[in-house]
Image: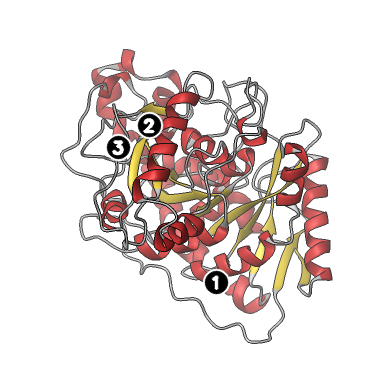
Amino acid sequence: MTTFAASSIPPIPTIARIRAEIASGDAGVEQYVARAYDAACESQASLHAFCYLPEAAPINAADATAPLAGVPVAVKDVLDTADMPTEFNSPAYKGRRPERDAWVVARLRAAGASIIGKTVTTEFAWRQPGATVNPWNGAFTPGGSSSGSAAAVAAGIVPLALGTQTQGSVIRPAAYCGIVGFKPTYGAIARTGVLPLAWSLDHVGIFATRVADVAYTLALVAGADAADPHVSCVPHSAATARGTRTRRIGVLSRQAGGEIEPAQQAALDRLAAQLARDGAEIVPVDLPAEIFETPAYALKLMSVEAAVAHGELVDRTPELVSPAMRGLVNDGRKLPATAYASIKAAQMPMARRFHDWLTRTMALDALLVAPATGEPPRGLDYTGDASFCAPWTFLGVPAVTVPAGFGPAGLPLGAQLVGAAHGDLDLLMLAEWVEARTGWQTAVAQRRA
């Protein structure tokens, strides 16, 4: 299996560089779109990142001065695209053609982006995997459910991709594939035209190779839409001026998702030590006890809401739905209404208490936590444990993962930063500072040498 991310094939430049080259006249709008399309087609036989590619490179005709003109983007196949099928990796929706783009896809196109294809998702963004392999080693999972989007960015095919997260479906595959993954505050990016799995937990997320590209994209796509009926919170706030205040980053004595592998802990410890040397205050903290209950709460919310969203399909054509999805729907139907209601009633108060604990009691800028147990699991049948991401999804707070090293199998390890709700740009500014101190680019260059 070709290890795309570690190969001698030059990866596509960052959004910042593409835009600079177009502005200077060193590249045309079509250049990198055509390159990405060709790379996507050539890699399909081994990487399997895409479930649909058009017959030719789809170059957006927007003016070259548009903020994403010339930037090729891959879109997870749970987000509607009017010019491409959206099938949710389900035979029940084979050939489905949406009438219009998802809200966030339309925002990208309006900004000049070229959508080169649809990426593989697990079925309905739940557990049944697709064919995508990890770009670093094809014997391992890329994670899920945003498998193809993470792999396409990690393999250097596109500089930007969209995914979704209901448990850990952006952060975990980004960590497994050695790229940046960002899940914003709940509701910061409208979900109109996005397949619902659990409306209380669904987030649209962003993949890129650099934090700066995520921040640039977020500024273009963040916003609310009246047709997204489950969101009432405000979009992300503007970044606040830091001045000379010392960055305060919390590190956990116990991870919210459970035990992690020694290599993952060592990567977090090395990074924390480097951040301390560069002036951050590293604060050991114990999470509030109720946070450890959130992975189970999130799964119960998801099972009930998935039963509402997909139960009719399961009843009508069970043979076209995986056992994993049928099981989730059945679990949701068995849960007492009072159990669901009590968790739903507790969700926002818990989020407010976490906000107060993070920003007032502990006065932290972010938590530095594990995005997963460690390296990706071997094989393609299991996309990994989402428990290390589920608490922050349940609470609706922004989270970002950056690559932080390699494990014993030579596969990427990530480091997740969790911030305060609506402080998305503050978190990304901190993540960009952290990113510069991981040593990741040097480690990758050494592997390519």
159 left or right, relative to 112:
right
262 left or right, relative to 104:
right
Farthest residue, direction left: 99
Decide: is 9 above or below 108. Answer: above
Residue 346 visible in the snapshot: no
Displayed quadrant of residue 378:
top right
Mark number, residue 124:
2
Decide: is 246 above or below 163. Answer: below
Q: Which amino acid does label 3 sit on?
A: Val
Mark number, residue 308:
3
Query: What kind of element bears circle 3?
Result: helix
- Give the spatial CA distance, label 2 vs label 3: 13 Å
Mark number, residue 426:
1
* Residue 148 on image: x %, y %: 47, 33
The mark that comes first in sequence, 2 or 1, is: 2
Q: Closer to the camera: disc 2 or disc 3?
A: 2
- Nearer to the camera, 421 or 391: 421
Q: What residue type is labelled 1?
A: Asp
Query: What kind of element bears circle 2?
Result: helix
Q: Residues within 10 Å of mark 1 (few under 14, many from 20)?
A: many
